[in-house]
Amino acid sequence: MTRMLQVAGREIRTGFRNPWAYSFLALFALFMIALLLINAQGYVQGYSGVTGTMLNLILYLLPLMTLMLGSFSLTGEKEDGGWELLSTYPLTTGAYLIGKYVGLAVVLLAIAAFGFGLAGVVGWAAGGGFGFRTYVVLLAFAASLALMYLGLSQLVGALARNRWQALTISAAVWFFTVMAWPALLIAVLGLLPYPWIKPGVSVLTMLNPAELARLLAVVKLGGGSMLGADYTEWVKWIRGGSGTLIFAGVCLAWIVVCLGLSGWLWERGRRRG
């Protein structure tokens, strides 16, 4: 536990010194403030054009930022020799990866919280802020995205040998899960018999953290009617009393599976040298 906390503390210090983190923070806050200023004519509650645009902004920017920061952190250790030094200490692979995850999670959540906080203050001053519940849902959406994609970034970092490979794999993961997902979903569902379409939608949604988090946020903001008949069951359970807890459990399962696979790949690469 002590070694894991040391790794996490080291990662937090490194993360807050990383100019990439501040670049993403500035970009994230700038676009959020711009959207709130555009909406300065009214006080927004629930799902609207502006909150939908905000969801898309977070969906496009945050997963890519998370994948790059997380995977570069691991591959940087491989290239710079940091892991060889750390491996001489009584530090297990699991403690190392969990420490990395915790440290990066603190950095990413701080970036998201600061961006939302700054945008909220500016929106309040301009008279165009969101309702409190809307802020809570958007922040929860951003946090769940960051935590699930951070798990994926650990998997990418364990798989890649250097930063260039990490960049390529991260871009591919981001493209397929965010940009190309609607087309891929339609293509796959088009190959299935009609009775399998609804179960297929459920399974494929569970496999994509971006889509899973987006559905929760849209329903919680009151836009569930826009999702279509195939998502009727999703809307029911998300609106139910246990919907949020089930979603939290799915997020935790995502993170555990990704970290478990990352540890296996890291140990495999360690044995091969």
Image (tube, rainbow, N blue to C red):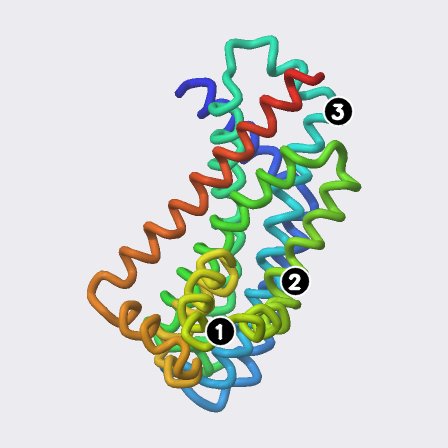
80 sits to left or right of 189: right
Q: Which amino acid type corresponds to the residue marked 3 in the rendered image?
A: Asp
For the residues marked 3 and 2, what is the alpha-carbon distance in whole angstroms? Answer: 28 Å
> Do the CB atoms of the residues marked 1 and 3 lie less than 8 Å apart?
no
Q: Which amino acid type corresponds to the residue marked 2 in the rendered image?
A: Leu
Q: Residue at x 56, y 32 (%)?
A: 11
Disc 3 or disc 2, which is closer to the eye? 3
Which residue position holds label 1? 193
**Of all residues shown, which one is farthest toward the front?**
193
Q: Residue at x 39, y 45 (%)?
A: 253
Label for residue 27?
2
Which residue position holds label 3? 80
Q: Quadrant of residue 273?
A: top right
Q: Residue at x 34, y 71 (%)?
A: 234
Q: Regarding mark 2 in the picture, which secondary structure is present there?
A: helix
Looking at marks 3 and 2 on the same chain, the residue that comes earlier in the sequence is marked by 2
Looking at marks 1 and 2 on the same chain, the residue that comes earlier in the sequence is marked by 2
Q: Quadrant of the N terminus?
A: top left
In the image, residue 160 sits, relative to residue 247, either above or below, namely above
For the residues marked 1 and 3, what is the alpha-carbon distance in whole angstroms? Answer: 51 Å
Q: Which amino acid type corresponds to the residue marked 1 in the rendered image?
A: Pro
Disc 1 or disc 2, which is closer to the eye? 1
Callout 2 environment at 10 Å: few (<14), some (14 to 19), or many (20+)?
A: few
